[in-house]
Amino acid sequence: MRLSCTVNGRRRVADDVWEGESLLYVLRERLGLPGSKNACEQGECGSCTVRLDGVPVCACLVAAGQAEGREVTTVEGLPALAAARAAGADPRPGAGEAAEPMEHAESMEHAGPTDGAGARREGDPPLAPVQRAFIEAGAVQCGFCTPGLLVAADELIERNPGPTDADIREALAGNLCRCTGYEKILDAVRLAAGRAAAGQE
Amino acid sequence: MPDARELPDAPAGPVIPADHTRRVPVDGGVGASTRRPDGVPKVTGDFAYASDLWHESMLWGHTLRSPHAHAAIRAVDVSAALAVPGVHAVLTHDDLPAEEKHHGLEIRDTPVLARDRVRYHGEPVALVAADHPEIARRAADLVRVDYEELPVVVDEAGATAPDAPVLHPGRTDRHAAHVPHPNIVHRQPVVRGDVAAARARAAVIVTGEYEVGMQDQAFLGPESGMAVPDGEGGVDLYVATQWLHADLWQIAPVLGLPEDRIRMTLSGVGGAFGGREDLSMQIHACLLALRTGRPVKMVYDRTESFFGHVHRHPARLRYEHGADRDGRLTHLTARIVLDGGAYASSSPAVVGNAASLGAGPYEVPNVDIEALALYTNNPPCGAMRGFGAVQACFAYESQMDKLAAALGMDPVELRRRNAMSKGSLMPTEQVVDSAAPVAELLERVRRRPLPPERPWESGGPRGAAGPDPRELPGGLSNTTRGEDVVRGVGYAVGIKNVGFSEGFDDYSTARVGLRVVGGEPVVSVHTAMAEVGQGGVTVHGQIARTELGVERVVIRPADTRVGSAGSTSASRQTYVTGGAVRNACVLVRGRLIELARRRFGGNGDPVWSDPDLRPFDGAIVTATGERLVGIAEVLGGETIEIERRWRHRPTEPFDIRTGRGNGHVQYSFAAHRAVVEVDTGLGLVKVVELACAQDVGRALNPLSVVGQIQGGTVQGLGLAVMEEILVGADARVRNASFTDYLIPTVLDTPTIPVELLELADEHAPYGLRGVGEAPTLSSTPAVVAAIRQATGRALHRVPVRPEHLVDLAVPDTGLPTPD
Amino acid sequence: MDFLRPGDWREALALRAERPGALPIAGGTDVMVEINHGGRRPEALLDLSALAELHALEHEPAGEDPAAPAGRVRLGAAVPYSRVVTELGAELPGLALAARTVGSPQIRNRGSVGGNLGAASPAGDCHPALLASGAEIEAVSVRGTRHIPVDDFYLGVKRNALAPDELIRSVRVPRATGPQQFSKVGPRNAMVIAVCAVAVALHPGRGRVGVGIGSAAPTPVRAREAEEYIAGVLADGDLWERRDPIPPAAARRFAELVAAACSPIDDVRGTAAYRRHAVAVMARRTLGWCWEAHRAGASDPRPEGGAPCA
């Protein structure tokens, strides 16, 4: 069958979709968006978390046909989403943050303890604040859980700019991570939320 | 050879993590918490994991696996499967192209595809390549395999009975001659002193039998990869693995190809923890690609992943400890039986670790340890983080608590009195010749203030509507408002070896280049090290910056165009491949200085004869830091490139009768203190805090080191309270899913404060000590000790299940229970 | 496989009648797991996720029905758990508590009470709360509408009382008239399938206590004997009015009777003996919490814990 939907703001069409395929498979294998991950395909790990009409869901449990005509946001769309929030397209909390063209790819490797700013380089991709916070806090190891966590954490901060630790844990309880023991992920979300609340990024 | 970004017709997205070229200041060197060079692609979704690879003309491979744990194969009929439209190949054992039809890390006992016998539930029997994964699955269902079920061997008694079915008849491996039964893979005693005499002197003796369940690595990125035929009979394989060259050495003979016809490139690896040491889909994808002439992608789903890799050995351990009145250990005996399952994998090395580390980080003058691994029809077991030392640590630390109780002594004090230190002798009589701050690590976790008591622990006021359930055992399931919730505190400490042991030639190779690009000096580091998330690529950049004084470092993709880097396991990569990178950098540095002297030192200026000239901050500087000339100027158009193998100091095999020998390279120590709350009514546990102290020698990247320790700690927590692959009496796996194999969520994990000690090991590069595994050892027994303290229950088995923590009206029947 | 996408409810019913082999799918949280892993290959999927009727949440006023003295909430079959948690905490507190324990936030955003009923797994988290409060299932086909009492709905492991041509339109749950509680145990603090679960609902106006049990028998079950016993204790002592504590011996007996209503098995998630034990403990605790709330005059027994589904 044919599937049309809007992914990260672009209208996309996929043909020859088998009716039993998941939205996750279509994103990864047909639309060239493998950022959403396939760790369990049973809704138990959250690695494939995307937003479907704004709501975080496991893309592996959405039948492809159910996404017809709907809006999907994946990890690949987070910078644009953050930029739109910052531009005031959405009055919800989190506005004021913006997708920044890389200070980060830079700072990522230079991050010497004494070095804060770092020049921006052309060609580095823009990052949403929550993406930057994950890098800075050391929340990324193997990175397989990272895209799903980012989508979930970004939505949490959008909805609840001042989450308590218990709120963060409840909101991210559906995203398994096997590498970090979660401590640095909590650090990253606290960092991103704190910055969003402070209106900086 | 193309890297994956040059795979023809790839859609937007998939890019092999290749050149992490970034401008960096030289102070992003060793000791800094430099950020990951792969961090940005990992947060944007651009990082190409093995399952993300894509090729326009690719086929999907699928594996048909045995539904039985032990059966004879009478016949296989693939005709119906082959007839399915969209199916391009169906392969069985008969299609294997070469004489060699087996693989295996230590013993080549594992059939690539089963021939006339399957030995475990999930063993690969046939392969399908098709246009779509669903077509491949359906076709696999149509392969008719005529099985005749055989009796299963599931435990020691069954495996070593006189009439036991021999699982691998005609063994010729190096352990075959010394094992007492052909169903024993390997047996290693370690004996020291005179246990009988010591026993007679002991004031207190405690014994215990312990059991460790089968833990799974549960890495999140499933086994996957893509094989691309080169059109000339060779193949390119992109894969998530822990050791490219060990894969290659096993793949080539089965394909009947020389190694240089198989080019391997590391794809993004979604965690490993030992589970990618053995081959999974590597040979299968190559076979299908060579047969069809098309690229073949294989991606296991989560269920298949549970069958697609080895697990942590389940173990039964019987210990006896004796001590004098002052709590000094007189002796120890241990019998450690590890279930290796159907194939050997790394069982022999796991046995070596369990035996040699089985006494723990203590001075014990008289020791009698026997460790062995069985062949059974259970799932094959092999490497997982902690590797033989995890099982032993749970038992000896449980014993130390038991001994402390018998002596009426504080458990930490008992450990301190027996703690090993630099200069101590291992039971193997190897001298521990670098820091072994066991007592200090314990003291550091003990000294931490305890988390404040929470109101319900003392039966105090709980608020009108009760406390937040998320703070309590049971969490969101809303099981208690503080009723029956009791706190417990427990301690444990462990010892792990770093690097490959027992005489293994454990080298790594690094190729380091220095050249000018765009007017600036750039270092390139090329190794075959598998970056599985641990941050080795970060450290390589830091080392290059430190040694060569150059900002920009390019980390080349890991592949087999450079020599082996050994495995990303045994906590060894920073030590060994880090050591190789440093070594190569030092050699490049020597050439650079030589070149500088040749080009600029000819004017007789004495500064050029300074023996301490070094590259720093992009220039050649003197010992006092005087800047002489830019590195770019020195190099001009020239490239300096050096590839070298580097080895840590050699080790020896353990004597097969006594266990004597300098078997290990380095030891690593960590201690934990666990604070738990147990709902004693329902048997639910909440770990409130899990503090760790570890000696890391030197933290090359403190942020990464702490991340490793916290991650390892939580894997230990998982083993303590929830993680176990359940195998039925028929040797079939009963919970191959993330629905029923549970790993900790963020609501199950406590705060994990970490204290690092940095006591340099003079034998190791930068004084570092391997980090990854030690925290996985002591975490489990610390949590269990805390649960014991809270409940007063003996708890001889992990994982502890809720039913082990309550008094049941009717005895359990269905599952293993503590003895 | 076909993908059937009915444009409206009537068309959905017609397709259901024409294509009995088509598997209804809404949130997909059960169906897609089976399809992804090749466990199920229906001839077609009947996608109900876009039908407005199934997302409706209606408040039916009190009528003549003595089982629903405060009226009912008509919960569209595809209303996701997350809405139950955030919007129905006051009206259906037991169900809201149960919904908060389902899977993860992502699952709660897709899965629904209707889906839980369609799958009819004994471990479904909603069933005990529906049993305790006396819900009924609105089953519709081209032939007409049936209102199936939840007590009659569960027929066996993953079997329910729906006819092959029927779809669940809604669940009609009596609005709470007293405190309600839900507890479940699993070896993990989140995202865990119930080893067993208990729901208790007080119905002060009717002098009744409803008790539902999950994952401790081939189907979700009511603990009728326990319900009658405790109702008798409360009536005999005039406790509803006096709001005195329940005698500890009576609470213990109640818990024993709830456990006696189970017929659990040993499986990978837990043993039969543990399930009986845990059901008794949870029955005693949840009854206690409900009763404390009744004594305090509170109608919303939700524990504090920040915003639900924060």
Image (cartoon, grey):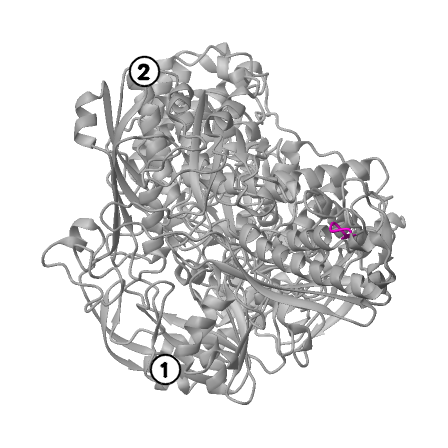
Q: Which amino acid does label 1 sit on?
A: Leu
**Mark 1 belongs to chain:** B
SS label for mark 2:
loop
Q: Does the magenta stretch include residue B612?
A: yes
Q: Which of marks 2 and 1 is in front?
A: 2
Q: Is residue A59 magenta?
A: no
Residue A175 in view: yes
State the image coordinates of residue B730 (x, y, percent, origin top left).
Answer: 24, 56
| Number of numbered tags placed on the structure image | 2
Q: Which amino acid does label 2 sit on?
A: Asp
Which residues are the magenta region? B610-615
Q: Distance between the residues labelled 2 and 1?
A: 64 Å
> Quadrant location of the N terminus of chain B?
bottom right
**Viewer-side residue, B509 vs C129:** B509
State the image coordinates of residue A25 (x, y, percent, origin top left).
Answer: 60, 67
State the image coordinates of residue A49 (x, y, percent, origin top left).
Answer: 63, 54
